[in-house]
Amino acid sequence: MDSIIKVENLIKRFDDLLAVDDISFEVKPGEIFAFLGPNGAGKSTTIKMLITLLKPTSGKMTLNGYDPTKDSNEVRRSIGIIFQDPSLDDELTAWENMEFHGVLYGIPKKIRRERIDQLLQFVELTERRNDLVKEFSGGMKRRLEIARGLLHHPKIIFLDEPTLGLDPQTRNHMWSYIKELNKNEGTTVFFTTHYMEEADRVAQKIAIIDHGKIVAIGTSAELKGRTQTDSLEDAFLALTGKTLRDESSSATDQMRMRHQVWRRQK
Amino acid sequence: MKAIYILWLRQIKRYLRSRSRIVGSLAQPLLFLISLGYGFGPVFQKAGQGNYLEFLAPGIIGMSIIFMSVFSGVDIVWDRQFGFLKETLVAPVSRINIMIGRTLGGATVASVSRRWERPSARSSMICKASN
């Protein structure tokens, strides 16, 4: 079977920093693929390149048969993304956020309305559909975001640390839904996380990236066998070392910080 | 085309929902109109130049349209901060259409909020005349 995501010799350089250093991997259709790594290892940069938000310095990528650098619209149509930080419009209602997404992705009105109802019901937000998103809790926002990412029935779904800051209940619920989707629709899932036990439980294949290079790739059992450890967490530490990583804050982080300070002063 | 429409609609909805923005966008030009208009009006008239408010109003309307437009530019920065910009950037819509939609939305908000100002400018002129 052909791979749905294929990355060959991908390199991304920011001035003097080599963020992604010649990585290659493949993801098979219908696979749940975990992409792990310490902070600043190059996970987000790789995802950004795959989802057409960043151009690689060199290398080749294919998603669902399309090249993100050339046929970006085709790639965008085939993927759904759930970002690390919320990307909902606070001033719109849950339903309006979904509708906005549906129209942007060109889903015909009748199908769109049906799917919005179904998805809102699934994430148990039907009763809150007409409430503004700014009144939602973190977990509710996340759920809405997941529903929105699935609205256009993507072939591949990207989740960048989707369970960050969620309680175990919501986390479980979310994964059971994603697994169900993976089984019924054959959606390929590509996710990053810092929770090793989550990757261990959900992922069929795991890649570990560190300092921009892929240090290991395989099933959870293979990784544990290779490092002769019992848990994925130990395997991860054995492969990436125990030193703490500092991630320089992005312009957006700095802006958020200023915003918080400014709000406190007010 | 639909993408442009939904981006436009979003701007309008956001504007109508933020009461502070509506009040702010009305208060500032009104303040100018009243304080400058009534403050300098008599001097202007004494110099034989006619109705000062009539002279002032178009300028203030123009100025506040520019202000509102700048605000809708700043909105993009807010969207970036709250992550919403990414949602539009990864959608299968051309960048040009995103820009057109946002610009139209901003332009509509700017001109519509000015429409409310004109009657108030007129009524203050009538007050002036009846004095």
Image (cartoon, helix red, strand yellow):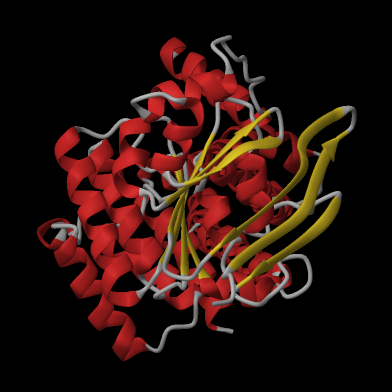
Up-down relation of residue A251 to residue A202 (above or below)? above
Indicate the position of residue B47 as horizontal and vertical percent values: 82, 40
**Number of marks:** 0
Task: State which quadrant residue B80 falls in.
Answer: top right
Indicate the position of residue B35 as horizontal and vertical percent values: 59, 32
Using the image as rendered, state which of residue A262 and residue A234 is in the foreground. Answer: A234
Residue B53 appears anywhere in the view: no
Could you tell me which quadrant the N terminus of chain B lies in? bottom right
In the image, what residue occupies the spot 36% across and 71% down? Answer: A151
Using the image as rendered, state which of residue A45 and residue A21 is in the foreground. Answer: A21
Residue A148 appears anywhere in the view: yes
Side of A30 relative to A37 (left or right): left
Up-down relation of residue A21 to residue B86 (above or below)? above
Up-down relation of residue A188 to residue A105 (above or below)? above
In the image, what residue occupies the spot 67% across and 42% down? Answer: A45
Up-down relation of residue A253 to residue A107 (above or below)? above
Using the image as rendered, state which of residue A218 and residue B27 is in the foreground. Answer: A218
Side of B112 relative to A110 (left or right): right
In the image, what residue occupies the spot 37% across and 31% down? Answer: A196
Indicate the position of residue A182 as horizontal and vertical percent values: 32, 66
In the image, what residue occupies the spot 65% across and 77% down? Answer: A65
Side of A66 relative to B48 (left or right): left
Indicate the position of residue A245 as horizontal and vertical percent values: 60, 15
